[in-house]
Amino acid sequence: MYDRVFNFSAGPSALPLPVLERARNEMVNFEESGMSVMELSHRSQIYNGIMERAENGLRQALNVPDDYAVLFLQGGASFQFTMLPMNLTLEGKAVDALNTGVWTQKAIAELEKIAQYRIAGSSEAEGFTRLPRPDEISFNPNASYVHIASNNTIYGTQWHRFPDTGDAPLVADMSSDILSRPIDVSDFGVIFAGAQKNIGPAGVTIVIIRKDLAGRASDNLPTMLNYRTHISKGSMFNTPPTFGIYIIALVMEWIAAEGGVSAMEKYNKTKAALLYNAIDASDFYSGPVNKADRSLMNVVFRVKSGDAELEKQFVTQAAAAGLSNLKGHRSTGGIRASIYNAQPIEGVGALVEFMQQFEQKYG
Ligand SMILES: *Cc1c(COP(=O)(O)O)cnc(C)c1O
């Protein structure tokens, strides 16, 4: 119909087709305004309506308590690696970080420049193919906060149970699994995520922050770097990424229509099981990740114990068959299938079928 492929990209990633169709239908003349969303003033009443739909949709999907602010910022998840320590560190209280791969290492590199920190647990010695075990983690009860990545996009690991950090607020980078499952927001001090994996288009960053934590920052912090600025102005201190926020509103409405995040979780579990079962059922494919820590979002596997030439063939031939972006991250090699909320089960089914055919040919 549209000649669309199944897109397994880790990010920016597939968006739900009904969202794209609706955006197309509303593109040129949004709600009889005579203009597109991109051309609306962010101060107009009509745009205000979009902002409310996005925020309320997100609040509803994740059941966000009233003492948390929901912000739509820019700079990507990476900018939060800088902004968080600038706002949340308390004098003499080091930040605790759990190191589970590239994205936490990048956050730690910023901590290095801005704050005192310590590594509370790491799985670096295992090549990040599993998460640190409880007996390998030690939290400082006086930490300013604890930094964690809920899903490790590159390695395909995911926290299925979050560690108990006691009185230290848990700050979670949920860039690659937000909205994929129900969470209890009150277990976290801050949740942040770049939009381009499971929320909407690139260019918007979601920050969900317990409001009292925003009180920690010094008044001397530059205006745009201070969460209080964005909370007091409803993410409208300056021009927000208006079109991206509009698409987020549509994605939130799509999630609600599908049955909310618990329905997403059920669907995601079914999709991931299909793929992991196919990997486990064959000697030709292998999954490097510790089974208990396997991600429901990014399924990482090797072809013939990591035969680089064969893996290249796999990626090329899959693309020719309409299965795009299956190449693993450049730092790990191998194959990675990202199956976020918007990846239909038909896409996973088509991949499993392709895997079987490929094995018959080269196994
Ligand atoms: C993609 C990703 C990021 C980086 O997001 P940007 O918006 O590009 O800065 C950070 N953390 C995780 C877990 C990611 O998957």
Image (tube, grey):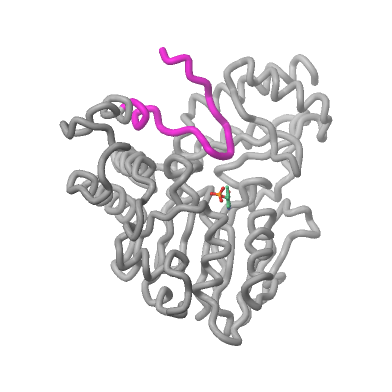
Relative image position of residue 243 (x, y in whole percent): 35, 40
Q: Who is closer to the viewer here, 135 or 70?
A: 70
Is residue 259 visible in the rendered image? The answer is no
Q: Is residue 127 left or right of residue 241?
A: right
Q: Is residue 218 left or right of residue 357?
A: left
* Residue at (42% x, 41% y) in the render: 200
The answer to whether residue 267 is above or below residue 4 is: below
Q: Residue furthest top?
A: 1
* Residue at (71% x, 37% y) in the render: 301
Which quadrant does the N terminus fall into? top left
Q: Who is closer to the viewer here, 168 or 79?
A: 79
Which quadrant does the C terminus fall into? top right
* Magenta stretch bounds: 1-21
The answer to whether residue 85 is above or below residue 167 is: above
Residue 291 covered by magenta stretch: no
Relative image position of residue 336 (x, y in whole percent): 66, 36
Is residue 2 visible in the rendered image? The answer is yes
* Residue at (58% x, 34% y) in the render: 9
